[in-house]
Image: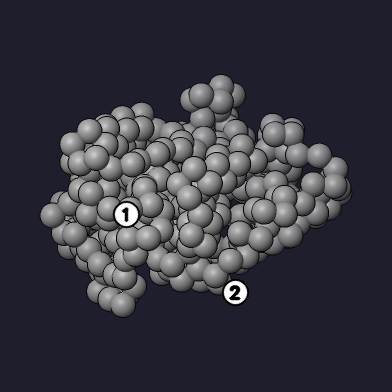
Amino acid sequence: MKKLINGPESVVEELCGGMAKAYPKLLSWDRDHMVISRQTRSSGKVVLISGGGSGHEPAHGGFVGKGMLDAAVCGDVFASPSIMQVYHGIVDNRSDAGTLLIIKNYTGDVLNFEGAAEMAVEDDGMVVEKVCVNDDVAIEESARRRGVAGTLFVHKIAGALAERGASLSEVKAVAEKVIANVRTMGFALTSCTVPAQGKPTFDLGEREIELGVGIHGEAGVSRIELAPSETIARQLLDRIVPDLPYSTGDEVAVMINGLGGTPLQELFILSRDVATILDDRGLSTYRTLIGNFMTSIDMQGASVTLLRLDDQLRDLLDDPADTAAWTSC
């Protein structure tokens, strides 16, 4: 294993510290609880908090800032933050307007974020609401679907509405609208290597692709022979498009998300193929985001996310944002 680290035991602390030092005007860092927060806070707006296991950088700390999250709680690599970590993130970012937790649908995240919310409500009299993202169409049963790259659209759109001064109920409603209209599926060309384990989380042959991988190094739902980008794009969209379903004439935002080890060259090729297929299916692409947003350490592969837009979601997607990993363009 070759990693640019000082030791497996210090990875999360040092990556959080490195992010805070790189963006001192933007971010503050609670070293005791591994919470990255905005440097400048406002008690008058709804607070958005997300987070989860580390290893998905730039998620989640990279999306803390104006127009998106107010704080991100960082667990160990691929492990949920504890209830107390999340609790301190909530209490230390208290707002008179209330708090919305954006949770990815993984058992540990759900249990610990919900437990922390109960503590903040019962012990501190705070107003805390929750939404749970489950955009991964690789899993048939919707209740078991994982929250993956589509979570970033929830951060962006709910964050934009909160920045405008909307109420907690309004911000929660728009977050739920995004969740209802976003779908994702990913694939892996290689596994990833967790620093503490020192070996790949699953084995792939030289000419094998894993379809439907999660973001915690989980194996996918099927394995196919290495194929051209256009073939992979079509297989992903054959699962994504019918699931909502997306219909002819729908306008969508597209995210081509690298999983950590895929060159931009290849992501642009995949983006081209996705755009061609969407055009052929009569879907109108309003905006395409390409890059590493929700990764799986060093996994080679990508995911494709579609968000069906209406006037409200389109408008909020275009609102300004200023974070380490998402700036308005």
Image point (28%, 42%), residue name: 126
Label for residue 95? 1
- Residue 144: image location, x then y, percent: 49, 25
Which label sits on residue 329? 2
- Helix, strand or loop at disc 2? loop
Q: Amino acid at mark 2?
A: Cys
Q: Residue 62, can we see it?
A: no
Identify the amino acid type marked 1: Ser
Q: Is residue 231 left or right of residue 20?
A: right
The disc label shown at residue 262, or none:
none
Q: At 19% across and 59% down in the image, what residue appears?
A: 30
Q: Are marks 2 and 1 in contact (CB under 8 Å)?
A: no
Residue 11 image point, x, y percent:
22, 56
Q: Is residue 65 left or right of residue 311?
A: left
Determine the residue positioned at 61% across, 37% down. Answer: 180
Point out residue 117 in the picture as x, y percentages from the top left corner: 29, 37
* In this rendering, position of residue 319 left or right of residue 119: right
**Which quarter of the figure has residue 315?**
bottom right
Q: Reply above or below: 58 against 221.
A: below
- Between 294 and 123, the one lying in front of the other is 123
Instruction: Report whether residue 308 is seen.
Output: yes
The residue mark sitting in front, 2 or 1, is 1
Q: Secondary structure at mark 1?
A: loop
Tag 2: Cα neighbours inside 10 Å, few (<14), some, or many (≥20)? few
Q: Nearer the viewer, residue 185 or 52?
A: 52
CA distance for labels 2 and 1: 29 Å
Taking the spot 67% from the left edge, 53% from the top edge, the residue there is 312
Instruction: Give whichever of 209, 139 is nearer the camera.
Output: 139
Return the x and y of residue 14 as percentages of the image width and height. Answer: 21, 62
Of mark 2 and mark 1, the one earlier in the sequence is 1
